[in-house]
Image (spheres, rainbow, N blue to C red):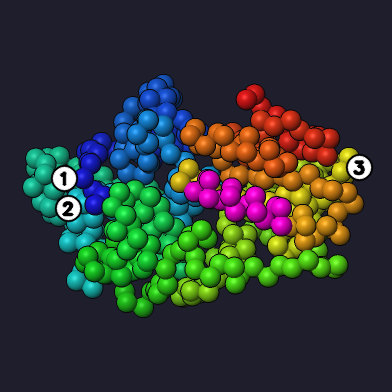
Amino acid sequence: MSGKEYGSLTKEPPLSKIDATIQSIKPGMAYRELLTYARANTHKDAPGLAKIRFLRVNNGGSIAYDHFLSLAQAHGLEAPLVRKVMYFLWAYRDDRIRRFVCERIADQSGRWRIDQLVNKANSDFFEEMLQSGTATKARSNFEYFLVETKIFDPTAPAVHLELEDGWFEQAALAAAQHEDDPIIRAELLANPIKFLEDRGWLGLLNWNGSSATMSSPLLTSDSAPLEDAEFEVSPASASTSFDWNRSGPSASGKKTTTAKIDLIARERANASHFLLEKILADLARGKKLAPKYNQNIDLYFDSPKGSVLAEIKSCNDTNFHAQLRKAVSQLLEYKFVYTHLFASSPTLLLIMETSPPKEKTWLADYTQSLGIILAWKNHSSQEIVTRSEIPSSLAGILVQIPT
């Protein structure tokens, strides 16, 4: 189980230095590149702490673009949801922090006791691992992390681990990517609350028994049963389309999740997905075009040089192939089903959240063989880039980069 590899509890550079280090990560970046960058620009200890707490490093030494980095890209590291995910990842992976929270800060029901959070005498917990002086520093460093992330407000005083924004679902998905044991990983995703309860870890949530609960699995769209039942598509001569002017996603405020989910609506609620939609819509409008969408198509538009049908997929390194495979079938299906929407046979455009992982670069050739242009967001700008030849219908919208 996670928590076997440790990072220093006594080294705690300012959170801004760790943030800047994480923000410098680009898909496919080698960890040694991050070390070099941090030593020159942020803090020499920041990469090691980020790695041990939040990041996945592949066997080849590259940093995985995983669910955590996807959340950070979509929401920003300073977003309360992302801060809470960072806290949970650290506690999940480091059983010293997990035990400290559950055994010293939280009571038996899992509710945090602020007087114990700020109790300097609790540093004796770390003395079984550290010398007395450094144990004191470890305790204060963790408290300071909670203050810097605004999880703990010492002026109120109050703890902000409210579940209504859905942070715990996202944290469970992120933590599962760090879990090597497939049985434990499946158990975590099947019911995260029960997973914590069975292990006596409800204290990680500041649990009060009346908070939001999750009684259904956190299934990915690729593993959800009866997924075909969620797709209501058939060839038709008419359908309802709308000008693209959607608002950004927001928390639903619901207290529970349900097993039956509209998978397309859920994907559109994803912040990364929305960001990609907005970038493409803005680029199209910049060329005086009118981007539209309907109940299934993410975005399409007609241009003087031809029509464009776009499918957008949020993804990370661990589901890039599965998401692309799904998108390919959707593009081909929508081209057939909605042929009446297009002034001409449309260019098929597949926009992924990130570039193909190194071992999956062949997917660009595969999609090209199907007449589909594979593109993705440049993580350093608001550009959508591709290694494919850009057709005239997408001139000025996509940016071609070297192969």
Q: Which of marks 2 and 3 is in front?
A: 3
The answer to whether residue 15 of the structure is visible from this angle is yes
Classify residue 134 as left or right of residue 282: left
- Residue 146 appears at what percent x and percent y? 33, 52
User: Which circle marks residue 136 in the picture?
Assistant: 1
The reply to whether the magenta stretch includes residue 32 is no
What residue is shown at x 21% (from left), y 62% (from top)? 102
Q: How crowded is mark 1: few (under 14 residues within 10 Å), some or many (20 or more)?
A: many
Task: Please tell me whether residue 343 is drawn above or below residue 229 in the rendered image.
Answer: above
Task: State how far apart marks 1 and 3 are (Cα).
Answer: 68 Å
Classify residue 107 as left or right of residue 69: left
The answer to whether residue 115 of the structure is visible from this angle is no
- Residue 246 appears at what percent x and percent y? 71, 60
Residue under label 3, please give it. Answer: 304
Q: Mark 1 is on which residue type?
A: Thr
Disc 1 vs disc 2: Cβ atoms closer than 8 Å? yes
Q: Mark 3 is on which residue type?
A: Pro
Determine the secondary structure under disc 2: helix
In front here: 271 or 373?
373
Q: What stretch is highlighted in magenta?
A: 319-333
Image quadrant in which the C terminus is located: top right
Task: State how far apart marks 2 and 3 are (Cα).
Answer: 69 Å
Determine the secondary structure under disc 3: loop
Residue 363 quadrant? top right
In front here: 56 or 127?
56
User: Please, what is the dominant secondary structure of the magenta stretch?
Assistant: helix
User: Which circle marks residue 120 in the picture?
Assistant: 2
